[in-house]
Amino acid sequence: MKKYSFLCLMTIAFSVVMSFTLINPLQTSLAGAWHVQNGTTEQVVIFQDGYFTHTAFDKLNRKFLGSFGGVVNVAGQELHASIEFDTKNKEQVGQHMHYAFQLISKSNLKTNLGGQEQQWTRLDEGNGALAGNWRITARMNNGQMQPMQRSSRKTLKLLSGSRFQWMAINPETKEFFGTGGGNYSFKDGKYTENIEFFSRDSNRVGASLSFDGSVSGNTWTHKGLSSRGEPIHEEWTREK
């Protein structure tokens, strides 16, 4: 009888631990895009596949105000981030930062990620064929797809269910080369970006770019015209 009771208690304890692990995946709960706006200034945070970006911009006045991001995970009620780029302060690159957060509801998040505590509204839950953290790995050159050698310099494109942001960075040297983003759609083989901020050229804000796109496993291929009107054909691979 005592043996049976002990086994029952162990089974119950194991079930409780497993239930907590399965029903409390904060990484999943935070996945997607979040938004806050004060006047014409907007802030968007994307959490996807263990990576995040935080960007402030003024779409109406075509102003890029700053962006930072990197690898992120959840520990209790804190976000633990390893910063890979920061457009305002490159000395933050390589630093490990902790940010408090509270998931008020499925659609509302309170966090000090932007420097002060604010309440954010969810834009999407990070679902979709393209939702993920992608790295460019090949580009068409002279009619042939040329692989890009992996190095500390990289161009990433982070997509939630409705938002995108690309960034060209070098975490090792703390260099930042550019970023842009906005909202996107992907339907019937057509990938369309609507640009809401662009660090290098504010005149790109408001433009829409459409590409033929397809996803096969961890490879995303798209081709079309760049924001400069130049033909592009690229392959992107999911970062793990």
Image (cartoon, rainbow, N blue to C red):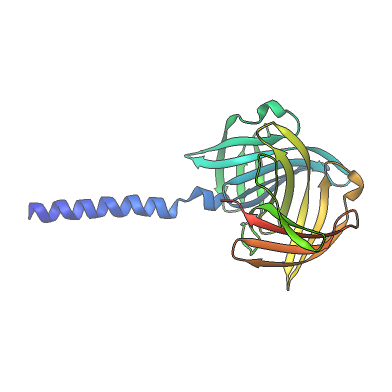
Please indicate whether residue 10 sits to the left or right of residue 138 in the image: left
Quarter of the image with the N terminus is: bottom left
Residue at image coords 64%, 61%: 219
> In which quadrant of the rendered view does residue 160 lie?
bottom right
- Judge whether residue 41 can be spotted in this image: no
Q: Residue at x 65, y 46 (%)?
A: 150
Q: Nearer the viewer, residue 138 or 142?
A: 142
- Residue 26 x %, y %: 50, 48
76 relative to 195, above or below = above
Give the quadrant of residue 162.
bottom right
Tell me which residue sits at (51%, 42%) in the image: 74
Q: Where is residue 177 shown, x and y percent of the image?
A: 78, 39
Left or right: residue 188 compared with residue 229:
left
| Residue closer to the observer: 72 or 115 | 72
In the picture as drawn, the residue positioned furthest to the bottom comes out as 188
Q: Nearer the viewer, residue 28 or 232?
A: 232
Q: Position of residue 73 (x, y in %)?
A: 53, 42
